Image (cartoon, rainbow, N blue to C red):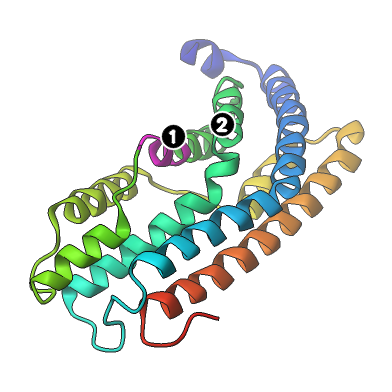
C-alpha cells in the first residue's frame, strides 16, 4: 500500500484524499452531534465523582500547603475527574478513531495526525479501572504525605508513558485546516457545519471541565463545598 501511495499520480492522490476527506467530514459531524447531545451525561458523571469525593474525603488534600506528594495526588484527582467526564462518550470516540484510521491518505501530515489522535484516544481507553482517589489520599495522609501511594505512582507513570508515546497532536482547528485543500464544492457546506460544531463542542466541554475542576479543588482543599 505504501508503494502504491508513493507511485500514485497527483490526480489519483488528490482523488484519494478528497474521498477520505468527505468520509471524515460525515463521520466527524455525526460524532460531534453525539458528543454535544451527551453534555448532560458528561456533566452528570463529573457531578457524581465530585459528590463521592465530597462524601468520602473532603478537605483531605493540603492544597494550601502543597508537597510533592500532594501535587501528584492533585494531578491524579484532576485526571480521574477528566476521565470520568468523558466516560459517557468514550466508546463513540474509540469507534470513530478506529473508523478514521482505516481511511487512506496520501498527505503524510493527515496520516500522522490521525495516527497520533487514535493512539491518544486508545491509550486513554486502555488505562482501565481508575485507582480509588480517596483511598490513595487517605493512604498518603496516614504517612504525613511523605510518600506517594504505590497505586498512584503506577497510575501516573502510565499516563506519563502514554504522553511520551504521542507526538505532534493537533488541535481540531489545526487538523481541519489540513483538510481544506481536499474539499470539493459539494463538501464546502458540510465542512462549515463541522467547523462550527467543533468550536461548540470545544467551548462547551472546556466550560464543563474547568468548572468541575475548580469544584474538585474546593472539595479537596480547605474551602467549603458549594
What residue did someone put label 2 on? 97
In the image, which residues are magenta?
119-128
Q: Is residue 11 above or below residue 51?
A: above
The reply, left or right, for residue 225 in relation to residue 146 is right
* Residue contact between numbered discs 2 and 1, judged by CB atoms under 8 Å: yes
212, 122: nearer the viewer: 212
Q: Is residue 20 magenta?
A: no
* Quarter where residue 60 is shown: bottom left
Label 2 vs label 1: CA separation?
8 Å
Residue 35, placed above or below residue 64: above
- Quadrant for the C terminus in the image: bottom right
In what element is the residue under mark 1? helix
Q: Quadrant of residue 188?
A: top right
Q: Residue at x 54, y 38 (%)?
A: 90
Callout 1 crowding tier (Cα within 10 Å): few <14, some 14–19, many ≥20: some
SS assignment for the magenta stretch, majority: helix
Q: Which of the marked residues, 2 or 1, is nearer the chain's N terminus?
A: 2
Q: Position of residue 47 (x, y in %)?
A: 56, 61
Q: Nearer the viewer, residue 61 or 171?
A: 61
Q: Is residue 81 left or right of residue 153?
A: right
> SS class of the residue under badge 2?
helix
- Residue 122 image label: 1
Packing grade of label 2 (10 A; few <14, some 14-19, many >=20) is many
**Residue 126, magenta (yes or no):** yes
- Count how many numbered circles sit on residues in the image: 2
Q: Which mark is residue 216?
A: none
Amino acid at each position: 500500500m505504501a508503494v502504491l501511495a508513493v507511485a500514485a499520480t497527483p490526480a489519483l492522490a488528490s482523488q484519494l484524499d478528497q474521498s477520505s476527506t468527505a468520509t471524515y467530514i460525515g463521520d466527524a459531524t455525526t460524532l460531534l452531534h453525539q458528543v454535544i447531545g451527551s453534555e448532560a451525561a458528561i456533566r452528570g458523571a463529573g457531578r457524581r465523582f465530585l459528590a463521592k469525593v465530597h462524601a468520602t474525603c473532603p478537605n483531605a488534600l493540603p492544597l494550601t500547603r502543597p508537597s510533592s506528594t500532594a501535587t501528584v495526588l492533585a494531578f491524579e484527582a484532576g485526571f480521574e475527574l477528566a476521565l470520568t467526564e468523558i466516560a459517557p462518550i468514550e466508546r463513540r470516540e474509540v469507534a470513530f478513531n478506529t473508523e478514521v484510521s482505516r481511511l487512506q491518505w496520501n498527505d503524510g501530515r493527515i496520516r500522522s495526525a490521525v495516527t497520533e489522535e487514535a493512539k491518544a484516544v486508545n491509550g486513554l481507553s486502555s488505562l482501565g479501572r481508575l485507582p480509588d482517589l480517596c483511598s490513595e489520599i487517605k493512604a498518603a495522609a496516614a504517612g504525613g504525605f511523605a510518600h506517594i501511594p504505590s497505586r498512584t505512582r503506577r497510575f501516573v507513570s502510565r499516563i506519563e508513558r502514554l504522553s511520551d508515546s504521542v507526538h505532534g497532536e493537533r488541535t481540531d482547528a489545526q487538523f481541519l485546516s489540513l483538510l481544506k485543500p481536499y474539499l470539493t464544492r459539494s463538501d464546502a457546506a458540510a465542512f462549515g457545519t463541522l467547523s462550527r460544531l467543533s468550536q461548540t463542542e470545544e467551548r462547551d466541554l472546556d466550560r464543563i471541565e474547568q468548572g468541575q475542576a475548580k469544584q474538585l479543588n474546593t472539595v479537596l482543599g480547605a474551602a467549603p463545598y458549594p
